[in-house]
Amino acid sequence: MPDNVTSLFRSTAAHSPSMAALTRESDGAGPVDFCIPCNPYFPTPAMFEEMAARLRDIITYYPSSADTITAELCGLLQLPPQCVAMGNGSTELITWIDHLLVRESLAVPVPTFGRWTDQPMETGKRVDMFPLQESSGFALDLAQYAEFIRARGTRVAVICNPNNPDGGFLHKHAVVQFMDAMADLDLVVIDESFLEFADAENEPSVVQEAMLRPNVIVLRSLGKNFGLHGIRFGYLVANPALAGRVRSMLPKWNLNSFAEHVVFMLKEHGAEYAQSLHQVRRDRMDMSGQLSSLPGLTVYPSQGNFLFVRLPVGAEGTVVRDRLLTEHRILVRECGNKIGSSSRFLRLVVRPQVDVRRLVTGLEQVLYGTSRRGAAVPEQATGTAYSSGTAAVDRLVTQTNGAGTRGLAQAAGAGMPLPAASSAPAVGPGGGMPVPAAAGLPQPEPQPVPQEAPRPQPAPQPVPVPQPAPQPVSVPQPQQLPQPAAYPEPAPQPAPAAPPLAPAAAFAAPAPAPAPMQVPPATGPTPPGVPARGGLTAAQVRGTDGLSMAPATGWPGAQSWPDAAGMGQAAG
């Protein structure tokens, strides 16, 4: 492996170079992969031998139609084929969901899987990003997320459960309540690509509930769960109308012969698959404990097959990544290019213990200076610092309140730290915007909008908005501002057009704040490129100025198979 591998990462459109590219740059053997979130225990060696024996036929002939492959998969999952659409990887399905079902806006918590932010932006949609807070462990508060969606007037909502890259998990009952509370939206997407690695509850999937609702799609992965990223296959579950609309747009042979062969092998290997999931969960606990023993390294709780870690103060993720690769032949995912994250964070895939010991040894040498090149951490500081990426998003939200980013777009790229943020409470009761960024930061006093003269205290004038926003800008702490200054027309506010969040009442939300002082009612969708209260446009964060149901009963013909959520116990 060459000493300078940074060029390999810069020359790819993905977050990391492919294993094939890395292998070509080395002596023919690739590095130990802690980057791609893949099941290391499945398929079994015997399954690989079977595929190798049939390689010639697999790659010579056309596969069967997608309907044939889908029918076989649905027989295992006990799902009606009319409610399922299989794609050439989840990315193909996300692309068609965006083209067909996202009309003008989409909300998504960040950091998360990049296609949920990038794909809609590429087609000119407004992406409303809800910043998850480092100070609260990147946990998603569904009640605050629902308020954020209402304030923005967003028409599509996305939840990744578990979330990538932090592994945050939401219990099934809370997700179902959120789905019902958002019943008036154009679409709600629950991305369960990593859910089969979770063990927080027995049946966490909402696929059964999704089929009964008119606006819900559940996205599932096969490549990640079956350890076969190179075979691009995944599927979605929805009511027949939604699933059929996506299925009708897919190419006839969008699934390849390898995907067909694997799907038809699965019914004979249910026990091995269930055991592989069990082993990954055990390895996750062991790996978390070993990494947590490293000084200054923070490991966040995860229900995925990966761990989100924050490097010690003074460590730069790209340096750690490059040195692990060149000196120890270990590939890791540095998360500096994820919105809402920074280069202080790595996502590390769960692997067998022998590989984890190699990773821990490599991190010790790179971080703490036991190697010939010295330490990547200049000195072991005390206390915790705030990640530059998260701080940049918080700064945009808090100081501009969605009014614009003059002078702050550069701060998003440079990562201006907020020293006191790490000691702030995880969730605040509100008083300003219904987003965790405002609640998780210390607020000694309201901050003026940049590039504007200070407002006279007695003058009840609203803050002028640099962009042509249709609404006046609210202030991060309205309880400290006279009501006439926050709202030019203090008339009684009408009830929001959207239905009340009755099902969300069971959420563990913070103490309620007065509605008139918190979020003015949405008067319709915000025009593209115009920020609204409590949120950011995608262009702003990018630093530009652009615009209980019947449970699944198992897998027929193979009682050792898990249920449709992958969480059942093996028979015997």
Image (spheres, helix red, strand yellow):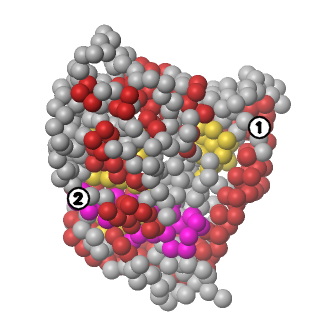
Q: Which residue lies under the disc numbered 1?
A: 295
Between 464 and 258, the one nearer to me in the picture:
464
Q: Secondary structure at mark 1?
A: loop
The answer to whether residue 385 is above or below residue 496 is above
Q: Amino acid at mark 2?
A: Pro
The quarter of the displayed image where residue 110 is located:
top left
Q: Is residue 199 magenta?
A: yes
Q: Residue at x 53, y 66 (%)?
A: 196
The mark closer to the camera, 2 or 1, is 2
Q: Which mark is residue 345?
A: none
Between 278 and 206, the one nearer to me in the picture:
206
Q: Earlier in the sequence, mark 2 or mark 1?
A: 1
Contact, mark 2 vs mark 1 (Cβ under 8 Å): no
What span is colored magenta in the figure?
A: 179-207
Q: Residue at x 66, y 46 (%)?
A: 299
Q: Amino acid at mark 1?
A: Pro
Q: Secondary structure at mark 2?
A: loop
Q: Position of residue 399 (x, y in %)?
A: 39, 24
Q: Left of 558 or right of it: where is 207? A: left
Q: Position of residue 81 (x, y in %)?
A: 32, 77
The answer to whether residue 424 is above or below residue 229 is above
The quarter of the displayed image where residue 294 is located:
top right
Q: Left of 442 or right of it: where is 531? A: left
Q: Quadrant of the N terminus?
A: top right
Q: Is residue 244 visible?
A: no
The answer to whether residue 469 is above or below residue 285 is above
Between 454 and 51, the one nearer to me in the picture:
454
Q: Which mark is residue 499?
A: 2
Q: Quadrant of the C terminus?
A: bottom right
